[in-house]
Each structure stands twice: as C-alpha cells, then as structure tokens.
Amino acid sequence: MTGIGDGVELGAQAARSRALAVLRIRSRALAVALLPAAAAVILLAGGSTGHLVGGGWDAARWVVSVLALLVLSAAAAVALVVARSRPAVTPTVAVAEESAPDLYRMVRDLADRLDVPAPSAIALTPDCDSWLEDRNHPAHGPPPAEDHDDVAGPGRPAHRRSTAAPVLVIGSPFLWWMRVGELRAVLAPVVAGTGPSAHPDIAAARRFIRGLDAAVAATSAVGRGPSARAVGAGLGWVSRLLLRSCRVHAAEMERGVAVAAAERAQAVDYGLRIVAQEQVGLAYAGWDRLLTRVALPAWRMGRWPSRLDVGVVAALTELSRRDRLAEGFASRLGERPACDLLEEPGVMDESVSLLAARLFHGGPAETGPDWAPVGWDEYAEEVVDRTWRTDAARLHRVLDTLGVRRAAEDAAPGTDGPTLSRVLDHLATTPPDDPAPARASATETDTDTAPAPVPETETGPAPDTAPTPDDPAAPHAPALPTTPTPDDDDDLAGTTARGAALAAGLSAQLAREEARAQVPGATTPPPPSGTAGGPTAPDTALWDDRALPLLPLQPPRTGREILTAHITAMVCCAAMDTAGAAPGLDWLDGPSLLVNGVRTTDLGPHVRSLVETGDPGPLRAWLAELGVRPEKPVRLV
C-alpha cells in the first residue's frame, strides 16, 4: 500500500505542477496585455506631477495611451470569447438516478472505496470507452432536475456549478456485454480520476484549456463579412498561440492525472480488471462489426435498429461459437449482466441506438415515415429484402439508360421483365474492337441518353414524387458525372469496359438519389466544412448537431464496390423469387442469403469474377446448383 500511495502522490504532484505551468502562461498573457496600460499610467502620472514634460513626452503619452486602449480592448475581446465560447461536449444519453438507482449506488460505493468524490451524474454513449467529462460551463445549461448533493439545482446560485464533480460517461456496449463485477473493475480507474480533478489548480487549468479550444472553434466559424472575418482571425490567432504554448503542459498534466487515478484504482478489483480489459477489446470488435455490417445497411434504408446493445451481445455470442479463442467468453453469460443495473434497459437501449444512428449516419432526431425503428425480428424483411430489391431496381434503371435490351431476341414470351440474365448477358458481352475506346463510347452514350429517359420519371412512383423537387432536380441530373473519375479509373482498371460504364452509371444514380433525399432533410445537412458557419445552436443543447454525421463509419464506396453490391442484390432477388431462398441476418456479416435455412458464403467470389473478368461461367454454375432461374423476372420495389 505504501508503493500505491507513493505512486498516487507522485502522479498528483506532477499533474499539479503542470497545471501551475498552464496557469503561469495565462498570467504571463495577462501581464503582456497590461504592460502598455502600466506604461501609459506611468507617463500620465509623470505628466501630472510635472516630471515628464515636453513635446516628446506628450507624444509618447498619446501613442502609449492609444496602444494601451487597443491592447486592452483586444485582451478583453479574447477573454470574452474564451469565457463565452461553449466547450465541446460528447453527445450522450443522460441516465437519471431514478432510472438506474443500482448503477448510481455502485458508482458511489466505488468512489467511497477509492476515497474520491462521486461523479455528479452518469451518461451513456454509443462507444466502447468510458471517461469523465466536465459539464460545468454555463453554456451547457442547468444541471438535471434531479437534486444530487454535489450538483446545484436549477434554483440555486450559478456559482455553485463550479463545485460539481464531472459526469461519468459509460460506453453502452459495456453495460450489456460486461458483468457487474467486470464493469466495476473497468470503471474503477475512471472514477478515481475525480480525485485529481477536484484540485483547484487542475480544475482551473482545464477550464482555461477548454476555453481556448472552444474559442478557436468559435472564431473559425465567423464568416459574416470581411470585418467579422478579420476580427475572428485575430482572436483565433491569439487563442491558437496560447493553446500551443499550453499543449505540452496540458498533455503532461492529463498524464499525471491518469497515473494517479490508475495507481489509486489498483486497490479495487485489480485481478478482475485484468480479465475485464479483455472484454473491452472484444466488445469494441463486436460493436464495430455490428455498426458497419448490420446497422449501416438499415440506416441507408431509412430504418434504425432499436436494440443495438442487445445486438452486440448476440454478435459476440455468435463469435464465441465460431472462434475457439472466444469459447470461454460465452460462459460468462450466466452471470448477472451490468444492464440489470438499469430499471428499463430496453428504453435506454433504444435511446442510445437512435443517438448512434445520428452520430454515425446523420439521421433525424425523431422517428417518422422515412426514419422508423426496426426490431431484430423484422430486420430480414424490413431491411435485407428491401435493400436487395431497391438495389436491383436501380441496376435495371441504369441498364435502361444505357440502352440495354430487357430480353434477348430468342427469349420466350413474358420474360421481358427485370431478369438476372439481362445483367449477366450485358456484362458477359465483349464490346467490339479495342476495350479503351469502347469504355469511352459506352460512358458517352450514358451521358447522352441519360436526360432522354430522365431517371427521375422512372423513380416517379416512389415516395419522393412531388412537383416541386422535379424542377430543381432536373438541372442537377446532367451535371452529375456519369463517367468514371480518376479515382474510379484506378479502382475499375481491372474490370471490363461495360462493367466500368455500368459502375459509373450506378454511382451517378446513387449521387442523384442522395442529393434529392437531402433537400427535405434540412435538419441533417451534409457534413462538408461549411456546416460550422450556421446560426448558433440553443444554449440548452449540449452538443452541436449541425455537422452530422460526426463520425462516419466508412468512406464513400468505390465504383467497383457499388457494382458488386448491386449485382449481388440482383442474384439474391432471383434466388428468393425462383429458388425459395430467404433473406437473413448474420450478426457478424450483416445481410445474408439463406438457402434451405443455411447461410450461403460462396457467392462473393463468383460475383467478383463476373465484375473483374466478365466471365459469368462460375456464377451461372453456382445458380444452376441452387436451382436459380436467371431468365425469370424478379419482383422489384
């Protein structure tokens, strides 16, 4: 225990010394701002007493006094911006004490064992991490209505906010995957950080750093006019200069706080914390896989899974069945899960799931006809089936714009609908002469014929039919490129000419649809850099939702990936309509095709062979083996 106490004291002492260094930089900046004013006072006092007289001294008094006023005005402006700018706050879901009394009791008991102040509140975030977050800034609004001992209520004096402990932010996947003991062990070093955070010097240094960071963000958003930009540039330069001066000391201060907290937490569940750290890495892998493979397709279809945390448990349980390295993790499921510490875990899971959709995809804040929750039992029909049929319909619309015949000359009557054979025959047909000019001619015909059929008329029966969007959308349709960009040229270099042209048409069609979808959704603008220049959000909002998605999951898909996904969707539609296959959900791989109740895993290589080489032989053999009839029309949305 002596070694632990020495480690805690050394870490806290290092953090305090670095905090004092930050405060000294603040004092020096204040001294530099007051220096011209002090010189002006000396000159004015000397003139009034008759010691500093003469024309030269009078000119000096005027120059120094004007300089002092300018410097003081600039210093006051910087101080005002630093004090009034709203520090960044992580988007979270607040957990009231009434909705999780056992969780609050566990955290307070943990704080008592560590001999540190208890966190003022608890919040959940859709991430696999936990930390303390200071929300005492006045711009963050009043604290929750719950009357905690260490949080000032709405009717109490505002100065008491400075004494509130930070908020404990917990990653929601931890609550559902970890057991109660594991969660307590993981939170021990986090809660121990409230001890150093309560020191006045460390708290003051953190407030100064957060204010500078917020001031830099606020000044970079000023763009009303030339004068406003000039003032913002000056204030931002001073804030960035001070922030750079404090960078090293701030980093070392936080490192000292972390060392002190880790040393203090060694006395609590040290052995269990080693085991729990393995669960942290496993939960992160399962959460990332669930978001990218399962949730993202649903978000793109206007549906948001309402039980993401339950899904991560199912995903990790499935991983334990497939991977022998994870066999021991499933045995933990018999113990009490940490989500039992919540009174209504389902409601909390739904709130966190909606927040995850907003952060990672940019969805609306409320549900609606085009943004509705979906349960895991409805995922296959509501998401997988609709996604495949929507992609297949888009594929055939692009084929129509390319002038591809719907049926072969020797086709049987009644087979002129959307068939898989149409896609296979088109991609398998070798263009005449050399392939390079063929690619250019194919893409040029796409741009020439695109306005004639007007893809918008084919999608007219869809829900976005309205007379107003048609007029503004019409001029944008020809403006979107249907030829491959330089990046797409590199990605499609190994494909056939017709495959490259089809990928370019699909990319352009997707861009048009996304552009039309963003017109009515003014609450969720696209994420380019201009989003920061809008009006200031209300003070009651803890975070700025004008730049959603804040954390995009994946970069934009390449032309090859788009083409492969659409061909795969068409194959799955043909299998469902002609061979009795069914859509399914795989917790680790996302949408999957079920044939006789078994997930197919060998479709991808056959589709890639068709895309890359134009050889439909392997895919046709796979279709024949499953009894899929590519010449039969399929049902589209």
Image (cartoon, grey):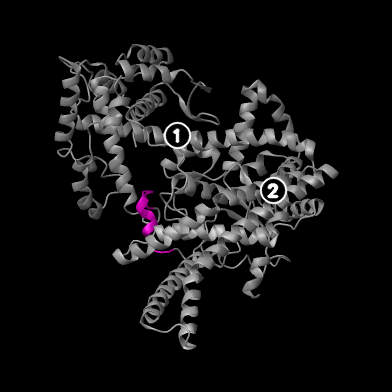
Depicted 612 relative to depicted 116: above or below? above
* Quarter of the figure with the N terminus: top right
Residue 384: mark: 1
Residue 28 versus residue 232: which sits nearer the camera? 28
Quadrant where the C terminus is found in the figure:
top left
The image position of residue 388, as x and y in percent, is: 39, 32
Q: Residue at x 81, y 47 (%)?
A: 5
- On screen, residue 332 versus residue 569, left or right, reads right
Which residue, as the protein is rendered here, is positioned at the far bottom?
49
Residue 534 included in the magenta stretch of the image: yes
Helix, strand or loop for disc 2: helix
Residue segment shown in magenta:
525-536
Q: Percent from the top left, x then y, of residue 561? A: 37, 28
Question: In the drawing, does residue 286 fall left or right of residue 116?
Answer: left
Most foreground residue, 437 or 291: 437
Residue 588 vs 616, above or below: the answer is below
Q: Residue 134 location, x and y as percent?
A: 61, 58
Under mark 2, the amino acid is Val
Left or right for 199, reference 362: right
Residue at 32 percent across and 30 percent down: it is 559
* Crowd rating for badge 1 (residues with CA inside 10 Å; few <14, some 14–19, many 20+): many
Of the image marks 1 and 2, the number of the one nearer the N terminus: 2
**Residue 155 among magenta residues:** no
Q: Is residue 92 at all visible to an observer of this figure?
A: yes
Residue 196 vertical placement versus 598 (above, below): below
Amino acid type, residue under disc 1 in the picture: Val
Can residue 341 be seen here?
no
**Discs 1/2, front:** 2
Residue 28 x, y percent position in the rendering: 55, 63
Residue under label 2, please give it. 190
